Amino acid sequence: MINLRTFDLNLLRIFEAIYRDRSVSIAAGKLGLSQPAVSSALNRLRRLFDDPLFVRSARGMEPTPKAELLAEAVGVGLNILRAGISTTTSFDPANSTRKFHIVMTDVGELLFLPTLLQMLSEVAPHIDVSVVEAGVPNYEDLLDTGRADLAIGRFQLPASYSSKHIHTSAFVVVLRQDHPFVETRRNGALYISYENYLRASHISVEPPGASADPIERALAADRGKRRIALTIPHSTVLGAMIGGTQLVATVPDKCVEWLLHGNPSLCAIPVPFPVDKNLVYQWWHKRNDKDPGHSWLREHIERIGG
């Protein structure tokens, strides 16, 4: 049985590095240790857990089933320790090598990542970002365990988590300009009637991180009259789908620029009925409230969303 009072926590850092890199030599280089030192630490871990933990293969050091279970616990524990320690240290973005994990949909990627990555390249070139895709029911667990630093979207989490509103958009209908349901007002503005909106064949985008659909809620009793001809998990193919068909899609207006880019046959017109604004928040675990690096990232994302 492992005695936690005498257990060397540095072994967990070495285990994490080998698990991440699948290589003793690469892990040693990143940790600033010699390869023999890391090999020795791995041997200590093997004796402590009575398991090989990693076995050599053509793809590198492959973890055993016990190592896979251990990796999740080690990752959670070290992330929580790092978060706690970081609240008492200063943060220098120019020299930081932190890696932030952000949960978002592909729409969030399009709206936030280009500007965020450009900013990082200029002021924080060593900070890495990993985008996590997951269903909303998993968001709390991801934030609790430290596998995600932020979750961005229009969903709501319990008040036990911290949040900040960062983005507001309206909904528009994207379709071909020559669609038979498109009409023109006297002032030249294009529109679609409520009746034709319900008659049209719709594309519904339902990514893993999608929350309740505001359009369904706004249509209320009429939602059953709208035909969903195509359901897809990602928005990036919408332009191609709409451009070659008579399908229509209802999307946040902030998505219009990239949807219409390279698709001159498409147009975006107002939704022909009242619908709540699309309110986007960033959520995080309260233990990160005073983490200077985490705060720095949140502030920049808020500026991007504004």
Image (tube, rainbow, N blue to C red):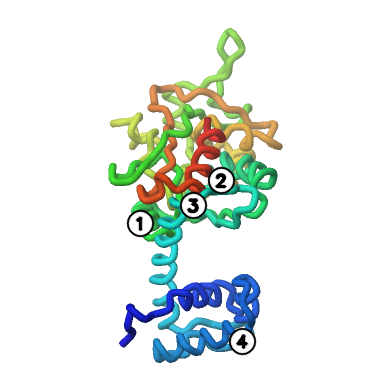
Q: Which of the two discs, 2 and 3, labels the residue nearer the N terminus?
A: 3
124 is higher (above) or lower (below) than 262: below
* Residue annotated with mark 4: 36
For mark 3, give the secondary structure: loop
Q: Position of residue 160 (x, y in %)?
A: 28, 46
For mark 2, give the secondary structure: helix
Residue pictured at 39% horizontal, 87% vertical: 49
Between the C-alphas of marks 1 and 2, the distance is 22 Å
* Residue annotated with mark 3: 89
Q: Which of the two discs, 2 and 4, labels the residue nearer the N terminus?
A: 4
Q: Name which residue type carries label 3.
A: Thr
**Callout 3: few (<14), some (14-19), or many (20+) C-alpha neighbours within 10 Å?**
few
Closest to the camera, between mark 2 and mark 4, is 4
Q: Which of the two discs, 1 and 4, labels the residue nearer the N terminus?
A: 4
Discs 3, 4 touching: Cβ within 8 Å: no
User: For this rendering, which residue is in front, 32 or 299?
Assistant: 32
Closest to the camera, between mark 3 and mark 4, is 3
